[in-house]
Image (cartoon, grey):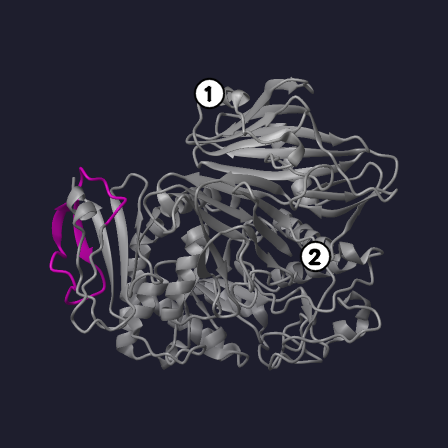
Amino acid sequence: MNRFFATLIVALSSLFVLQAKDEPAVQGQVSITVETENTSMVMYVDKDRNLLFRHFGGKVTVPENFNLYNSYRRTDYGTDPMAYPAAGGRYFNDAALAVRQSDGDMNTELKYLSHSVYEKTGDVVNTEIWLEDSKGVRVRLIYQAFWKEDVIVANSEILNTGKKSVCLESYYSSSLPVVADKYLLTHFYGSWAREMQVDREILTHGTKVIESKKGVRTTHTENPSFMLSLNTESFDENSGEVIAGALAWSGNFRIQFQMDETGYINILSGINPYASEYELGKGASFITPPMIYTFSRQGAGQASRNFHDWARRWWCYDSSVVCPTLLNSWEGAYFDVDTKTVTDMIDDAKNMGLDLFVLDDGWFGQTYKRNDAKQALGDWSVNSDKLPEGIGYLADYAHKSGLKFGIWIEPEMVSPKSNLALKHPEWIVRAEDREMPTMRYQWLLDLSNPEVQDFVFGVFDNTMQLGDIDYIKWDANRHVESFGSGYLDRQSHFWVEYVQGFYKVMERIRAKYPKVFIQACASGGGRVEYGALKYFNEFWTSDNTEALSRAFIQYGTNLIYPAFVTGSHVSAVPNHQSGNITPLKFRFDMACSGRMGMELQPKQMTESEKEFARKAIASYKQYSDLIYYGDLYRIKSPYDTDFYSMMYVSKDRKRAVLFAYCLKYQARTLIPQLRLFGLDPELEYMVKELNVTKSSFWGSGKVFKGDYLINAGINPKLVKIYDSAVFYLEAEN
């Protein structure tokens, strides 16, 4: 059982006050409602004790009306939407739970036992529903309803109450039946340097699957999230019904959309059953990871804002602390770091007004020196040839300069050329008697092994002792290949046990270092998911720092994940990934729409460029709270137009910051019209363009009524490729 999720459930249960007593098993009709301020999820127990799903969507004030509901279906056809369907019996679609009994029986028929409702101060309500099979399998369905954020988190606990072990062949977190006339699926795919690309498709009969089988860097395939627009074939930011979902799991996942012959789509979400049969011994249980849902009647925009509000308040690690603006050494120095290079970069970062310096790869290794990517991972001692004064000296130098100090590690990996690989070959993920393929000249350590967990924790712990460290960049530059564990008896447990081992390490780290800021990097955006964000303060969105590419990457990312966890850096030109050349202002304007930093060698900048950087950084600090804690309104999509624009609005709607970008030359023919949804129509706003000597908008410095800005908008003259603008709006007293 995943200790983190078990602890989470126990902790929540201890906080909650019993609101309603358990409802016993029935022979009649029982309605069970999970609700937030604006949504309802309704389930129903029929006379045969089957738990049926009736509704997820807008608020239903009298859910008991569903007791009268008639689907006109023959019950013996197995087409009624089950709340948590099990394989076998009369159910013929893909099931949330598939169990193989010790006698070979592969049928499971879950019947309702009871349910309970628990409450915490009206903001969070926990509902638990107990189901059982006659052969000794029980399931606890857990629903957490976050009232103000309109978010419902679902997962399950599977218990073996029989006398012998059973085998779980699939064990999804959630099943969500949905019915509509049309379904438009928005989901996200990509790879290194092109993460979170948006794909949209109309769902028809059959099965659509979003999944990863990589184990690590799982979001360099698909992302475990989606938006489902109902009763439409078009994606709309501001209107229409949308269901959005995201799985909090840092390993193999599967989200499946299966449309049956009745037009229902059943959404299965959870751990990918690929090569992952899980043996559950007598008396044992397994807790599945959380699946996060929200419903919006105001289009995709409101669905995003629901997710962002929930993540800030309830989920992301310590969202009250935002990463300072930073300079990272990677693209400025790569492996060629030494004391003078680092101290010079710290000086330049200070002079431009940044707050943090991060020393990236290349600082370690003695026997095998980290002068390139081919060796030394696992040997986490300071390279005294490069840094004779040590890390503590650099950290102190930064702190005396008024900056915080951070450092890069990659503790899950090991180089074949390392003392660690020679000493502990049994710690390496490998299939016995098969080749051990390398990726980026490295192997993967087996986090299912408690000894490896101790080692990885020790890497972090020892790194923190090198000096006064404020920030850790945690990288992971490969996925799982030729999987196998020298520690596990059951190899099919590997995919689950690795992730659980990773979470155990992070729990230990956070217990000892609750205040250190940690970034989740996995070759860029390989861990962009909510499972990691329970422990990490932010993720590195992509190794691709090129501003034009980032328009598409960050647009997709922020559909699901909030901007304050989205690392976005200004880099040099020609860009090191794409070779593209873009203006410095365009690069800054793009980076400033997320958590802004820099990733270059300042000595290669001109004085005029440094002066612009100082002004842009100072401006960013004046409005960055809007990006971290404001409401996001997407105005122009880079997928639908040649422009990209979004706005962040304070909760009281008195302040806002607007970003706009021209992505293609318009030949003086197209001028963007930006309608500023999210403002208060009754307030009057001063509109001011930042970081320019001549504004792109005739109305810069003027005051406009909110209803004008909402309904007519503004039309900045952005007509050349890479034109961009940042506008600050503040309500007049």
Residue at horizontal 63%, vertical 45%? 289
Q: Quadrant of the C terminus?
A: top left
Residue at horizontal 48%, vertical 55%? 187
The image quadrant that residue 615 belongs to is bottom left
Estimate the x, y position of residue 620 in percent, counting from the top left: 31, 58
Residue 725 visible in image: yes
Residue at horizontal 41%, vertical 54%? 563
- Vertical placement of 500 versus 17: above or below? below
Secondary structure type for disc 1: loop
- Vertical placement of 620 versus 161: above or below? below
Q: Residues within 10 Å of mark 2 (few under 14, many from 20)?
A: some
Estimate the x, y position of residue 156 in percent, counting from the top left: 66, 38
Residue matched to label 2: 274
Estimate the x, y position of residue 548 in percent, counting from the top left: 36, 70
Disc assigned to residue 62 = 1
Q: Residues within 10 Å of mark 1 (few under 14, many from 20)?
A: few
The magenta segment is 676-705
Secondary structure type for disc 2: loop
Q: Camera-side residue: 45 or 252?
A: 45
